Image (tube, rainbow, N blue to C red):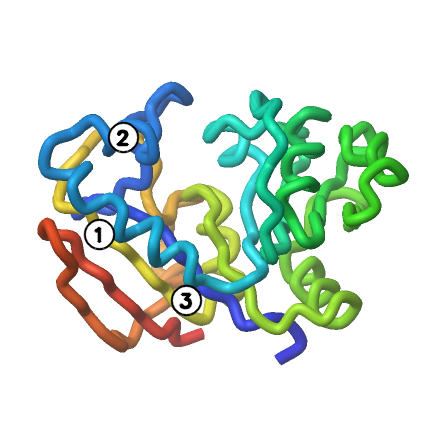
Amino acid sequence: MERPYITLFLLMSVDGKISTGDTEVLDFDLDFKEVEGLKEGLGQYYKLEQETDLCSINSGRVLKKVGVNCEHSEPEKTPVSYVVIDSKPHLNVSGVKYLAGKSDVLYIVTNNSEHPAFELVKQCVNIRILKHEGEIDLSKTLKLLKNDFGIERATIQTGGTLNSEWTRRGLIDRLLLVVAPVLIGGESTPTLVDGESLHVKTDLALLKTLELVSAKPLANSYLLLEYKVKN
């Protein structure tokens, strides 16, 4: 392929939610630790996360939500390279510094010439900026990661809206889902894949069918599902 092999890896509820609610103060990582019946098995997700690809693709919005902008401690260096899709930007100077300190290489993908990463390129030698003019082209981004930086495999952990873009553009090869034993509900609560709804019959061409590779029960009623995406 002209791009890396891509796995979408996420924790979700049985009803497909990837957050406990529709506000920034609600988050799986924090909230599940407080809920009986969920906190007991949550560690399995983090253990599996440690076994994913050494290139991790995230969004600035998700990273802001989990608190990287507020980190002031010295991060532990890891062998993982982070790719952050961030146009707003959601990351501030502290967040970029923290991620650069944690990453092997930190790739910032943005179309915002005011992104704080530009201030830190000389200070943090492991920052690479993939600047786009106009809308960020996800296909082009993946091709650049492979052709210019030699990345062969990557794991995506982004939000529902961006997941829709990856999926409908045929950029996901594999799903690895940890299903938590909980029903969350809420029509505005983010799901695994959000984005624009389908409207007419011709839109059915955008559907991505899946081939089940494995279904593995985990401890405490958690479940690990692996699918191949039929692009």
Residue shown at 56% from the left, 70% from the top: 153
Residue depicted at 33% across the width and 24% down the height: 26
- On screen, residue 143 versus residue 202, left or right, reads right
Badge count: 3
Q: Secondary structure at mark 2?
A: loop
Does the rendering let one see residue 33? yes
Report the Cα–Cα distance between label 1 and label 2: 14 Å
Identify the element where label 1 is drawn.
Answer: strand
State the image coordinates of residue 98 (x, y, percent, origin top left). Answer: 65, 34
Q: Is residue 199 visible?
A: no
Point out the tag, 3 or 1, that comes first from the N-terminus.
1
Question: Which residue: 70% across, 63% down?
Answer: 145
Relative image position of residue 203 (x, y in whole percent)? 41, 59
* Percent position of residue 215, x then y: 19, 69
- The amino acid type found where label 2 is placed reads Thr
Determine which quarter of the picture holds residue 184.
top left
For residue 70, above or below residue 231: above
Image: 78 above or below 75: below
Name the side, left or right, on which 82 lies relative to 146: left
**x, y percentage for residue 149?**
75, 66
Q: Nearer the viewer, residue 53 or 1?
A: 53
Q: Which numbered disc flags the more N-terminal residue, 3 or 2?
A: 2
**Amino acid type of the residue that numbered disc 3 sits on in the rendered structure:** Ala
Q: Is residue 170 above or below residue 86?
A: below
Which residue is disc 1 drawn over? 179
**Mark 3 or 1, closer to the camera:** 1
> Which residue is disc 2 drawn over?
20
Q: Are marks 3 and 2 in contact (CB under 8 Å)?
A: no
Mark 3–mark 1 Cα distance, whole angstroms, equals: 27 Å
